[in-house]
Amino acid sequence: MREAPLAGVRVLELGTMYAAPTAGRMLRDFGAEVIKVEPPGTGDYARQWTPRKDGLSLGFSRLNAGKRSVAIDLRRPEGRALVRRLAARCDVVIESFRPGRLESWGLGYDVLAADNPGLVLTRVSGFGQTGPYRERPGFGTVAETGSGFAYINGWPETPPTSPPFGFADSIAGIAAAMGTAMSLFRRERTGTGDVVDVALYEPLMFIVGDMLLKYQASGEIQGRVGNGTGSASPRGIYQAADGGWLSIAASNQTIAERLFAAMGRPDILADPRFATNVARMANNDAIQSEVSAWVASRPRDEILAILEKHEVVASAVNDARDILADPHFRERTLVELTGNDVLGKVLMPGPVLHLASSAGPAYDGVPEIGQHTDEVLEELLDLSVADRAALRAASALA
């Protein structure tokens, strides 16, 4: 077995819900051991998310499979003391409390780094650790609206639209994992730890950042353009004769020329309205009508075969059933979530990137709340049965 790049790295995950656990999963995907601290009894609130099967949240399962769960009550001083001791034995702590909460508990970076100078503290919050909004609560929906994304997402005739999934949270979690890895790399050179500060909205604001430059350059506020980009044409989602949907992205001149050849319409380029991208954008409705009519003239598979032959950038619009049946995704992208009696063996997306130097991880079960409390406390802190019983008597442990 090839060794993963983060093998030997131990992560203490204090974060809940979506973004911080996504960061924890990203690190685990590449070899880190992740110990998840959850409130006794209730656990991470993500355990209550729907959809569920026999009481098991599918979203929680995807983000937390393979982690070890320790049930510690951070509201109790004994619980906070335990977390401080655990942090001293870890390389990374991930947290998603409102800024100032860790400090009020006596668990700020100055305290944790005094015990463990090489510690990387990764902090994910709604608006970051600095700035006028730092104390505001924030979830992904707030990040998607505050970043500008929702304003430009949708159609001109529809309201601003947030996505029906944890979009901002996922991007922030991936960014937090990247920041953690960079800080660990820096620690290899300097021996000192670091603080990674991720605001939920910032990675998403980076993605839609062209809208800010557009306004400053032209005074134009970018609006909603449906399935287009507002910068290249033809591009969009089209319905074939059999009712199936597909996407085409002719986002540069060469691909546009290939598309018109695939359509049997090289003459389109002779029309000054469609000869260049600038011209096509000025006449976008007209060129989109041409493409839509051609796609609607044949079944989806036939259209996709023609586009593939002409090397046009295109794809079926997949639903869950399509993805699970696709041989490319099954070979490269989907992995088994095993070791859980409720779900059995199911497939889910694996790591977001592939390294030639290491094999992918196994996703061997979804932890129950506090499933690993005793083994982790004995293994890392050498707490005896009597010690743990005393902590349970103080309601610090489940």
Image: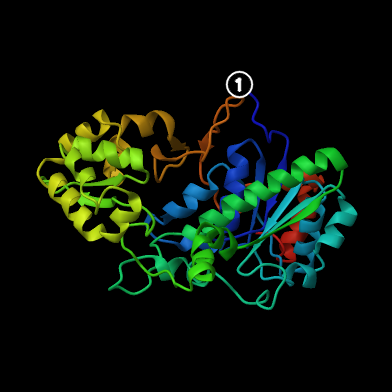
Residue that appears at 61% across and 36% down: 30
- Secondary structure beneath label 1: loop
Q: Quadrant of residue 91?
A: top right
Residue that appears at 67% across and 32% down: 5
Of all residues shown, which one is farthest toward the top?
1
Residue that appears at 54% across and 51% down: 368
Of 87 and 298, nearer the camera is 298
Residue 34 shown left or right of residue 156 in the figure: right
Image quadrant occupied by the N terminus: top right
Q: Which amino acid does label 1 sit on?
A: Met
Question: Where 363 falls versus 116 (above or below)?
Answer: above
Quick check: can you spot residue 227? no
The image shows residue 119 at horizontal and vertical percentages of: 80, 50
Quick check: can you spot residue 350? yes
Image quadrant occupied by the C terminus: bottom right
Residue denoted by label 1: 1
Badge 1: residue crowd in 10 Å (few <14, some 14–19, many ≥20): few
